Amino acid sequence: MTNLGKYSKVTSILIVFSIMISMYAHGQQRYHSNKLIPVADLSKRRAIGVSVSSDNRLFVSFPNQGSNYLYGLTEIVDGQPVPYPDDAWNAHTGDSASRFVNVQDLYVDADDYLWVLDSKPAPKGSIFGGQGASAAPAEGAFKLLKINLSTDAVERVYTFDDLDKSASGLNDMRIDTDKGLAYLSDPGQAAIVVLDLSSGSSRTVLKNQPPTTADPDIVLTYDGREMRDRHGNPFRSNVNGIALTKDNRYFYFKPINKLNLYRIETKYLADASLHDAQLAAHVEDMGETTVTHGLIADEKGNIYLTSSMDYSIKYLTPSGELHTLVQDSRLLWPDSFGIGSDGYLYVSCAQLQLDPQWNDGEDKVKYPYMIYKVALP
């Protein structure tokens, strides 16, 4: 090669490197995968919960945040969100017992019922730490709905009457159809809540145990910027994402601010005679994974984890190997999962780290909010 050829090659490399640096500086896409497929454009409405029925009906929920709020629960029909199960449940005013207040999570169980967690924590129970909350006592409002997808009718509503609503912040839930129990993560109390679906009574377990408590040394960081509010307080969440294996044997869980993933056999969660120390002895440490918001299990026993700090979705195999399913810069705070019988994993992207609260009052959200899907391995 001539000296001129060598010079041209070096120059080209420098130009490409400069473009990459410029893209990084201006927040443009650094990762891209054709495996990540857009499913629904949600405009300026932030989606949280995602779930899919056995016949691939896609349901998406929205927290009640600000002027862009329209519906609490929707079914995606021809790429568009349609209020579900009807307009009345999605009304903005009226009796809170018969309308959605702040839908947090969705789950289609093994019997094809849709479960809807309507969760509005008190400031003390919020994952935002109650910053700016008044000193006056406040209680959260929580209900869990069971919807028959064959009739689109709400069959039962649970109201958690024995829950500490001043401190709770119910976040995610899974339904054990074998034992007639619901398992819910409660970052507000750093605990797991076990709800008896027959009696409606609940128990709070594994409270403030190491596997349910955030690691204060882990600060979420995106492109070199720590996720802190205007007072310098970092975002922090205790136990948050959860998963239940398809055979209902294992319950997986972890805080957002902790790298290790944990699991416990559900037979122990179902045993009301066990106190927290005894339950903690049955918790298994599955090893280090990643900062995670949502979890889900597939038919093969893989556990999928959202991995927001590197814009990816990962999965842990039954043999304990951690793989990356997809990495793409569009995965901005990938949050909740649904798995269809069509062979796809569906995911919402909440973009929480781009909210004004964490960016000196500047809204850095990259509209529109989207639902994506990616083929299962």
Image (cartoon, helix red, strand yellow):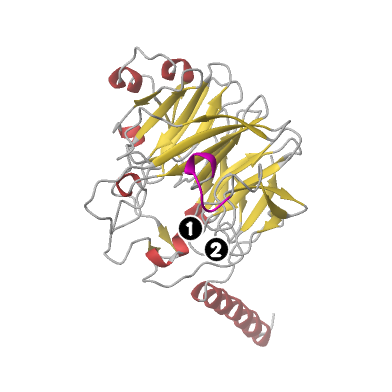
Few, some or many residues within 10 Å of mark 2 (<14, 14–19, 20+)? few
Using the rendered image of the protein, determine whether residue 92 is visible from the camera's viewpoint.
yes
Q: Position of residue 352 (x, y in %)?
A: 47, 58
- Report whether residue 320 is seen: no
Mark number displayed over residue 68: 2
Q: Which type of secondary structure does the marked residue at label 1 adopt?
A: loop
* Secondary structure under the numbered disc 2 in the rendered image: loop
46 falls in the magenta region: no
Quadrant holding the C terminus? top right
Quarter where residue 159 is shown? top left
Q: Quadrant of residue 121?
A: top left
| In the rendered image, the vertical position of residue 310 relative to residue 377, given as above or below | below
The range drawn in magenta is: 91-99
Asked whether, in this view, residue 173 is left or right of residue 135, the answer is right
Question: Which residue is located at x 38 percent, y 15 percent?
Answer: 272
Residue that protrudes farthest toward the front in the picture:
94
The residue shown at (34%, 14%) is 274
Amino acid on which disc 1 is placed: Gln
Callout 1 touching callout 2 (CB < 8 Å)? yes
Percent coordinates x, y for residue 293 in the rendering: 48, 46
The residue drawn where x is 51% and y is 48% is 94
Which sits in the foreground, 356 or 211? 356
The furthest residue to the left: 135
Quarter occupied by the N terminus = bottom right
What x and y, as percent, mark residue 234? 32, 57
Q: Is residue 220 left or right of residue 57?
A: left
The residue to which callout 1 is attached is 65
Q: Main secondary structure of the magenta part?
A: loop
Q: Dot 1 surroundings within 10 Å: few (below 14), some, or many (20 or more)? A: few
Asked if residue 228 lies left or right of residue 111, the reply is: left
The amino acid type of the residue labelled 2 equals Asn
